[in-house]
Image (spheres, rainbow, N blue to C red):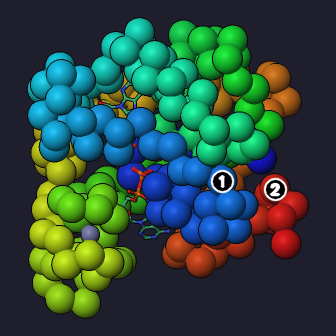
Amino acid sequence: MKLIFLGPPGAGKGTLAVKAVEILNVPHISTGAIFRAAIAAQSPLGLKVKAIIDSGRLVDDETTIELVKERLAQSDAQSGYILDGFPRTIPQAEALETFSKADKVVNFDIPDTAVVERLSGRRVCRNCGVNYHTIFNKPKQDGVCDACGGEIYTREDDKEEAVQKRLTVYREQTAPLIDYYRKKGLLVDVDASPQVDEVVNNFKKALDIN
Ligand code: ADP
Ligand code: ADP
Ligand code: ZN
């Protein structure tokens, strides 16, 4: 199954994607995670996008489209994928259609207040990228990743100023994709506000997965 996860920053896309890949056995492709890995490696891509991402703005369409096009050409993505965080603009959605056709678009339905609460408490493992939350999903040991023992940190773009910028960017550039995909008959709404297990159930029901 080829799925797009669409929703505001902090809606729980990455968290659900980790669960969904176990159910569907497809790769989880997160453009944000790819960019963060490039930044950590100080590659040319990473150096180009670091300041943009830290400030909460979007990386340019051309760079992002090229990245996804190359990733979707790899063998593990031929029979399915979860695209998490792409497309984020109408031009990205139009470009995607020229190289891959998604089966469904999962729209994460969640109020702004919940999003701010989730983003402000989000912590991430610097080594493996796993997400935690200071209230909803604490690591066993403070500041240490359960999965790999890596250091847990606060993303620069999860600090308050960048969060407001990202919500504005979401409303202006990404939210129009909801109508875009609804008109194409691809949109599936999932209530993303309850706790994780319940969101997983909502997702399975919405996609008719057992
Ligand atoms: P979140 O999990 O908060 O939704 P992501 O990890 O998906 O954030 O993305 C982090 C940042 O990476 C974005 O704020 C943006 O700067 C950049 N980014 C990720 N995906 C895209 C995209 N499709 N187009 C442009 N920029 C992107
Ligand atoms: P996104 O990928 O959409 O930006 P994440 O999956 O990174 O969102 O989740 C944002 C934060 O909210 C993380 O700290 C995560 O642990 C937490 N979180 C995710 N889903 C839920 C949920 N259903 N209930 C409470 N907290 C959640
Ligand atoms: Zn880790």
Residue 164 can be seen in this image: no
Image position of 59 (left or right of 153)? right
Q: What is the x, y in percent for residue 69?
A: 54, 21
Instruction: Name the residue tied to disc 1.
Output: 26
Amino acid type, mark 1: Val
For residue 35, above or below residue 210: above
Kindly identify which numbered label has been placed on residue 37: none
Tags 2 and 1 touching, CB below 8 Å: no
Q: Is 54 in front, or is 46?
A: 46
Dot 2 or dot 1: first in sequence order is 1
Amino acid type, mark 2: Leu
Image position of 186 (left or right of 64)? right
Instruction: Give the Cα distance between marks 2 and 1.
Output: 15 Å
What residue lies at 31% left-to-right and 20% top-to-bottom? 59
Instruction: Name the residue tied to disc 2.
Output: 207
Label 1, residues with CA under 10 Å away: few <14, some 14-19, many ≥20: many
In the image, which is nearer the foreground, mark 2 or mark 1? 1
